[in-house]
Each structure stands twice: as C-alpha cells, then as structure tokens.
Image (spheres, rainbow, N blue to C red):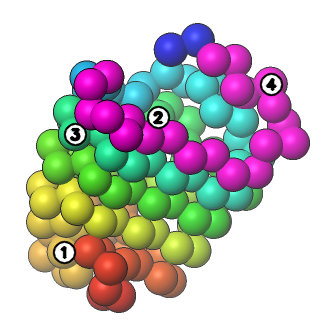
Amino acid sequence: MKWNLHALQALKNFSIGDECGGGGVELFSEEGLLPSTLASIRIHKFPHLKRLDIKGLQQFLSLEYLCISGCPQLEKLPQHGLPTSLKHLQIDECLVLKERCQREKGEDWNTISHIPDIQMDYRSI
C-alpha cells in the first residue's frame, strides 16, 4: 500500500476498516506506512487479516490507544512489540488473538502486560 500517510505529521487518530469484507487484505507490514505521531489506531473488520506486523510500531511514542476488532483470522500481535506509551488496548471479535493474549497464560501476554487498560470482547481483563 502506498498511501504516504507518514507525511501527515498532524494526524493523531487513524481508523481503517474493510466494511464489505471484499478487500482480502491479509497483512499490514510496510514500514513508514503511518506517521509516528498517532495517538490512536483502530483496525476493524478485516476478515482475512492474518498478520499485523507494522514495523516500527514500538517507536510510536505518542500512541496511547490501539483497537483491533472484527479480525477473526488475526494470528498475533506485531512481532516487534507494542509501544510502552500504550495505555489502552482493545481486542474484540478476534478469537485467535484473544486466546494468545489471555492473562498470564497466553503466548502474547508478555507483549501486552505493561498496558494498564486491556479489554477483550468488551470486557476488562
């Protein structure tokens, strides 16, 4: 994807969704795709998304809110980790990812345990 959004340094909130489910996007991975000044990111309704590997996401020092919803095939969080500035993580309707993020026993728990407010399927954990 060549959107050149990284040039929009005033952009604070970013939301993207595949409302019709026909896009077939399976991977977000391009480095520099988004501006590092974002405070919130919402990724929703990508039924075919398997990987969210936004390189450099852990360097988004202003990012406080991340919402991932309606991505039932999403297998795991970005392998390079999440920013320490993240205060709210919301994961809804992502069955595989929900299992990986279970408190103290999920494979990705260590990746998210530093986040003060974690919600899964509309409930705080």
* Residue designated by label 2: 54
Residue found at the far right of this picture: 10
* Residue designated by label 1: 102
Q: Position of residue 116 (x, y in %)?
A: 50, 83
Q: Nearer the viewer, residue 106 or 23?
A: 23
Which quarter of the rendering shows the C terminus?
A: bottom left
Q: What is the magenta range?
A: 3-23
Q: Are discs 3 and 2 less than 8 Å apart at CB? A: no
Element marked by disc 2: loop
The residue lying at 64 percent from left, 33 percent from top is 34
N-terminal-most mark, 3 or 2: 3
N-terminal-most mark, 4 or 1: 4
Residue found at the far front of this picture: 20
The numbered dot on residue 7 is 4
Disc 1 marks a residue whose amino acid type is Gln
Rendered position, 76 above or below 108: above
Mark 3: few/some/many CA within 10 Å (<14, 14-19, 20+) = many
Mark 4: few/some/many CA within 10 Å (<14, 14-19, 20+) = few
Rendered position, 85 above or below 53: below
N-terminal-most mark, 4 or 3: 4
* Residue designated by label 3: 47
Whether residue 100 is visible, yes or no, is no
Q: Are discs 3 and 1 less than 8 Å apart at CB? A: no
The numbered dot on residue 23 is none
Front tag of 4 and 3: 3
Disc 3 marks a residue whose amino acid type is Pro
Residue found at the far bottom of this picture: 124
Element marked by disc 3: loop
N-terminal-most mark, 1 or 2: 2
CA gap between label 4 and label 3 equals 28 Å
